[in-house]
Image: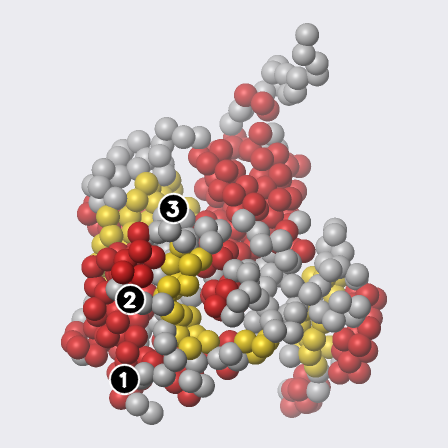
Amino acid sequence: MSNIIELINAAGLTGRGGAAFPSAIKIKAAKENKARLIVNVCDGEIGAAKDGWVVANHLNELLEGVALITSGHAKPIFAAHRDSTTARLLAAAGLKVLEVPHRYVSSEETSLISLAHGGTARPMTKKAPFVFGGQRSDGKRIRPTVVLNAESVWRVSQISRRGVDWFRSYGTDAEPGPRLVAVGGFVSTPSIIEAAAGIPVMDLINLAGGLDPSVRLVGVGGLGGILLTADEARSAIWDTPTMKSYGGGLGPGIITVWDPRQAAAHTAGAMIAYGAGESAGQCGPCMFGLPALSADWNAFAMHPGADTHRRLQNRLTLFERRGACAHPDGVSRFATSALRVLGPELLQSQPYFAGGNQPTEVLSYV
Amino acid sequence: MSDTRAVESDLARIGVDRVLCTGHGICARTLPEAIVLDEWGYPILAADAVRPADAKLAVKLCPARALFLR
């Protein structure tokens, strides 16, 4: 096999879009099947910003990475949200831009492949990886196509230029290499940071202005991610084993410090409701399940008690691998995590609506 | 142990095309040990390995053509 795949394999590069799949395997399959390359520059997750940053600051190296991966066949496509700054930068550079609608699931891997084939930007059932080609559920033929995250492609060119040892001088043995993290939310200077696995989460937050003492929650990975309490964030290490112990992963490189002036149960509920509204409406467990999850969250947040708690817990067991894409898995992961950090205090508290002497609903207006 | 492996290797693995599935629920009747339905009638795979003959029948009887053999 070609030298570049051996280099990527030796470097241990994994996809930086969140799935962390070994890039060498994917790129080898792409070359063997002469798959068309789609570079995902959408930053589709809530709080994501790093891939647009790669285009804005390292476009030449990104294109070098593209050339190494495609070795000249089939013109690569760059997926970016319609009317975004990133889409304009790519178009100005004369590149083929796939304009992606502003919906949460439209930048999902198979949504992009469907869109590139003239379909809607909605996820497809993936019986086998589309790098081998396949078909959509309606029978439309899908040509071999591979989707790589923009940061991953940029790293390929860096590995080629600077070498495996340079790459492996960052991160941990299990998770080598530099990786970008967008730190935002309730910080003084939201930043894109060149980080690596194994460093304290607090180091990342400090580079974006630090953690205000009033902060209570820190999000990792957006709507498909998890929540940490501020205390957990103060001791957490930015690596997969640590994040996995809290129910998540490194995701697509996002840390969001939650604004302590907003009621966290309400913010979490708003995110779950947003997630429900962003279902593509194709798979029953998602299109019916997520609105039910949203209702169950709200019922628990408004009336925290054993019955609403149990109902929410039962609901959260109904999403694992039950969609064409992982959107229902992601939202339920987030809700599970929100329940972990917020559930105990809600159950202990006597919120206004749950108070024994308070009216629980307006019976009639006079 | 070798007996168990032999039996497991004889089983068929099933999957659901979630885009095609419209919740007819026939699969829960044809594969009652492997599939239960949620409150809207969409399948929950309690097990994805079933006897090949049962799997073939279930795939054949799925009105949405959503059930498939892996």
Q: Is residue A90 above or below residue A261?
A: below
Amino acid on which the number 3 mark rests in the picture: Gly
Q: How crowded is mark 1: few (under 14 residues within 10 Å), some or many (20 or more)?
A: some
Which of disc 1 and disc 3 is earlier in sequence? 1
Relative to A45, say whether A152 is above or below: below
What type is the residue that disc 2 sits on?
Answer: Gly
x, y percent for residue A268: 48, 39
Q: A127 or A302, which is in the foreground? A: A127
Q: Is residue A39 toward the left or the right of residue A65 in the image? A: right
Gap between marks 3 and 2, in whole Å?
37 Å
For the residue labelled by badge 1, is the local secondary structure a helix, a strand or a loop? helix
Q: Which of marks 3 and 1 is in front?
A: 1
- Left or right of A310? Residue B39 is right
State the residue position of label 2. A94
Where residue A63 sits, quadrant-wise, is bottom left
Residue at image mark 3: A219
Residue A281 visible, this orientation: yes
Which mark identifies residue A4?
1
10 Å neighbourhood of mark 3: few (<14), some, or many (≥20)? many
Residue depicted at 73% across the width and 55% down the height: B38
* Amino acid at dot 1: Ile
